[in-house]
Amino acid sequence: MERKAVFALIACWFIFCFAKVNPTVKEKINWLSIDELNLKLKTETKPVLIDLFTNWCYWCKVMDKKTYNDSKVISYINNHFYAVKLNAETKETVEWNNKDYKYNSESKLNDFTFYVTQGQVGFPTTVIFPEAKQPPASIPGFMEPKDIESILKYFGEGYYKTQKFEEFSANFKPTW
């Protein structure tokens, strides 16, 4: 009887040690390239969110880990926006609204960076185009999930069409 118990314990130990555990798959933001975005905008319009970053930017990395990894932020962006992650220093030509933006060797930035930030360059910058043909709203700096909620909902739910952001944010009740 003792042998059977020992054998059963050893068998259980092997099962637990070597069994494959499938980790829960975490949802991620559906980041698009500018080219993919341009194709999607031809068939369905949605507000566009651009995460403008550089590889050397510390706060860009923190925003990726903390804000763009938050389940509520992920879900909201995926449901209400087309999202693009764009390196401000890209040497590739960026096409937006039938205009080409090229790398500027003097500034070491792509000219699209100057367009979407209206020349007020800083990283990270969250850029939102409520509609593709409208001017961008650029929000410089790191934002926590609780900080970005009102901005996402202002544009994602179309409040920008009927009221100024100051009015909207004064009455906004955060849920995150």
Image: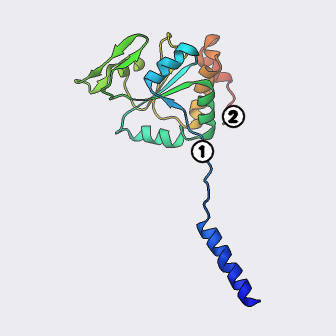
Q: Nearer the viewer, mark 2 or mark 1?
A: 1
Which residue is at a point 49% across and 10% down the rendered structure image?
133
Residue 82 in which image quadrant = top right
Looking at the rendered structure, which numbered label has been put on residue 175? 2
Query: As displayed, is residue 69 above or below residue 87?
Result: below
Q: Residue 61: where, in percent of width, then height?
A: 43, 41
Residue that label 1 marks = 26
Q: 54 or 31, which lies in front? A: 31
Label 1 element class: loop
Viewport quadrant of the C terminus: top right
Residue 64 in view, yes or no? yes
Q: Who is closer to the viewer here, 83 or 153? A: 83
**Number of residue marks:** 2
- First in sequence: mark 2 or mark 1? 1
Picture coordinates of residue 54, whole percent (x, y): 37, 34
Q: CA distance from mark 2 to mark 1?
A: 21 Å
Residue visible at 77% across and 89% down in the picture = 1
State whether residue 48 is above or below residue 98: below
Left or right, 110 with reference to 68: left
Residue at 37% x, 11% y: name it: 99
Q: Amino acid at mark 2?
A: Thr
In the displayed structure, does residue 6 sit left or right of residue 51?
right
Q: Return the mark for residue 64.
A: none
**Dot 2, how many residues are within 10 Å of its Cα: few (below 14), some (14-19), or many (20+)?**
few
Residue situated in front as seen by the camera: 86 or 119: 86
In this rendering, position of residue 136 left or right of residue 105: right
Residue 76 image-quadrant placement: top right
Q: Identity of the amino acid at label 1?
A: Lys
Question: Could you say where residue 53 lies in the image, as x and y percent from the top left?
Answer: 40, 32
